Amino acid sequence: MENGGIVAGKTVYLETMGCQMNVLDSELVLGQLRTLGYQPTEDAANADVALINTCSVRDHAEQKALSHMGALKKPKARRPDMVVGVIGCMAERDPDGILRNMPHVDFLCGPGELNKIPAMIDEVLDTRAQLVALSENKSRRSSLLSRALEHDSVEALDLSRAAGLPGRVLQAYVRIQRGCDKFCSFCVVPFTRGAERCRPPAQIVDETKLLADRGAKEVTLLGQTVNSYAYPDNGRRIGLADLLERVNAVEGLERIRFVTSYPGDFPDDVLAAMRDLPKVCEYLHIPVQSGSDAVLARMNRRYTVGQYVELLGRAREIVPGITLASDFIVGFCGETDAEFGASYELVERMRFKHIFCFKYSPRPMTVADKRSPDDVPQEVKRERNVTLLKLQERISREQNQSLIGQTVEVLVEGYSKAAVKARAAVHDCERPVGWRRPDQLVGRTRTDRIVVFSGGERHIGTLRSVHVQSATALTLFGELIEEGTGNEARISPPVAGPSTDRTR
Ligand code: SAH
Ligand code: F3S
C-alpha cells in the first residue's frame, strides 16, 4: 500500500481502554483509517490491523491491556500479515517492556503521535520492521516525522454514542487541552501525555460548528484540568469562561459540558458562565482525591479540604440545581484510618451525585512511587473502597428517589443496552427473551442523571420531558411525556435545591 493511499476491503479492530481522552483518540484514529478505506470490525482475530489503545493510570488497566495484547499472539502467528499496534499511554510509558514481552507487536505509538498511525501501518507492511513513535526524540527506527498527517485539523470528531444508531452524530468530544502540569505525586499522566498545551479558541469553535452542522446536540470539552485553560488572544487571555461563551454561541448545539476540573484556581467566572449561558450544563466533575489535608499535601494537590468545600459551596450558591461529582483515591501511601475517615466524612457531607473511587496503584516514574512505600495493605484498600462506594450509593439513591414524581428534561441519547440487544435478536429472527425491551431509550439530564424510558427512534437526538416513576442509585426510570397528548399537565414545577434537577 502506498502511504496515504486508499485500501479496499481491509479491516481494523480497535480496543479502547481508559478515559474519555482515549475514547476521543480512538475515534480520531478510526476516522483517519476510515478515510483510507479501512472498515472497523469487532473480530480482532481476523482483522488486518489490530490496535489496542492503552491506559496507564492504574496497574490494573495495564494488566488488562497486556492480556488483550497476549490474545493477539496466536492470530498474528496464524496470519503474519496482520499488523498489531499498541497505542496510547502504555506505549509511551513502557515501550521496552512491551517489545520485550510482546514480540508480535509491530508498532508502538504514544498518545501525542497518533497522527502517524497510517504511515506506521504502511511502513510495517513495507519493511516488517518493528516501529516506535513516542514524544519528542524518543522515536526509533522510524522516518515517520516527515510523513505524518496533520492532526490538528481533525482534533474533534464525531463520537456517536447514539447506541444502536451507528454513524449518527449526537454527542461529541472536543479536546481543548493536552497534557497536564500539575504533577500530583501519584499520577502518571504528566509523564505519558506531556506538558499542558491549550488549543486555540478559534479552532475549538470552528470544530464545534462543524459538529453542530453535522447534527451534534452536545459537546464535551476535554482536558485534564480544563479550568486552567488559557490562550493569548490580541493581548488578552482567553480562559475557560470565555471559551464557554464562544462555544455557547454555536447554533444548533443544545448542551455543553466540560471535564475534568481541578479544585485549585477554579475561577468564579466559570461558575457564572454555568449559571448564565443557557447551553452550559449544571454539572461539575471536580476530583478531590482525599478528605484529609495531610494526604492532599502528600499527593501534591495544591488546595486544602476547606478550600474545596468552600468552592463547592460557592458552586451551589451561584449555579442553582448544580450536581457535583468527585474522584477519591483510597489507601494512598501512609493513609491512616483517621485520614480515610476524613474522606468518608467529606463524602457524607458533600452529597455528590456520584463519585469514582480508586485503590491507590503505585505508578513508575511518579514521586510517590519513588519516595513513599505503598504501605496500605491491599485488603485495607479494598475495604475502604467498598465502604466509600457503599456510602455514596446510599446518597445517590436518596437523591434519585427524591426526583420521583418530578419531570426532568433529557437529551435522548439512543437505545438502552438491553434494547440494542433485543433489537439485534429480533433482527436475527431470534425471539426476544425475558424482559428485553426493544423500545427502551436512554436519556441524560443536564445534571448528568441517566433516565430510562420507552419511546421510538424519532425521539433520539431530541430534548424531551420524562416523568420519573422509580429510581435506583444509578438510574431514573420514567415515562415520556409526549407533546400534544395532554400529558404536559403532569409537568411538576421545578424545585430549587442542591439535589433537584432543574428543567430549562
Ligand atoms: N485530570 C484527570 C485525571 C486523570 S486520572 C482526568 O481527566 O480525569 C483519573 C483519576 O484516576 C484521578 O482523578 C484519580 O482519582 C485516579 N488516579 C490517578 N492516578 C492514580 C493512581 N496511581 N492510583 C489510583 N488512582 C489513580
Ligand atoms: Fe493527574 Fe493530577 Fe494532572 S491527577 S492528570 S497530575 S491534575
Image: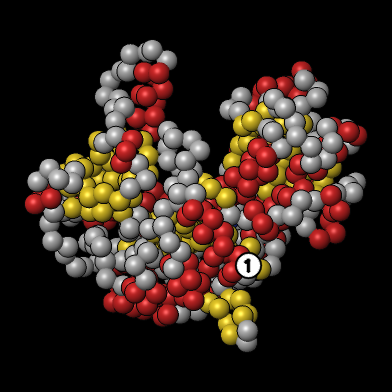
Identify the residue shown where x is 56% and y is 47%: 23
Q: Secondary structure at mark 1?
A: loop
Question: In which quadrant is the N terminus drawn?
Answer: top right
Residue 171 versus residue 23: which sits nearer the camera? 171
Residue 164 versus residue 501: which sits nearer the camera? 164
Q: Is residue 340 visible?
A: no
* Residue under pointer 1: 199
Q: Is residue 223 above or below residue 487?
A: below
Q: Is residue 383 above or below residue 135?
A: above
Identify the residue shown where x is 81% and y is 23%: 80
Estimate the x, y position of residue 449 in percent, counting from the top left. 31, 52
Residue 488 versus residue 26: which sits nearer the camera? 488
Estimate the x, y position of residue 354 in percent, counting from the top left. 36, 55
Q: Horizontally, is 94 left or right of 338 in the view? A: right
Total label count? Answer: 1
Residue 430 versus residue 297: which sits nearer the camera? 430
Q: Quadrant of residue 497?
A: bottom left
Estimate the x, y position of residue 440 in percent, counting from the top left. 29, 34
Identify the residue shown where x is 45% and y is 49%: 215
Estimate the x, y position of residue 416 in percent, counting from the top left. 35, 36
Q: Horizontally, is 494 left or right of 238 in the view? A: left
Q: Quadrant of residue 256?
A: bottom left
Question: In which quadrant is the C terminus drawn?
Answer: bottom left
Q: Is residue 419 above or below residue 486?
A: above
Tag 1: amino acid: Arg
Identify the residue shown where x is 13% and y is 54%: 491
Q: Is residue 407 visible?
A: yes
- Mark 1: few, some, or many residues within 10 Å (few <14, many ≥20)? some
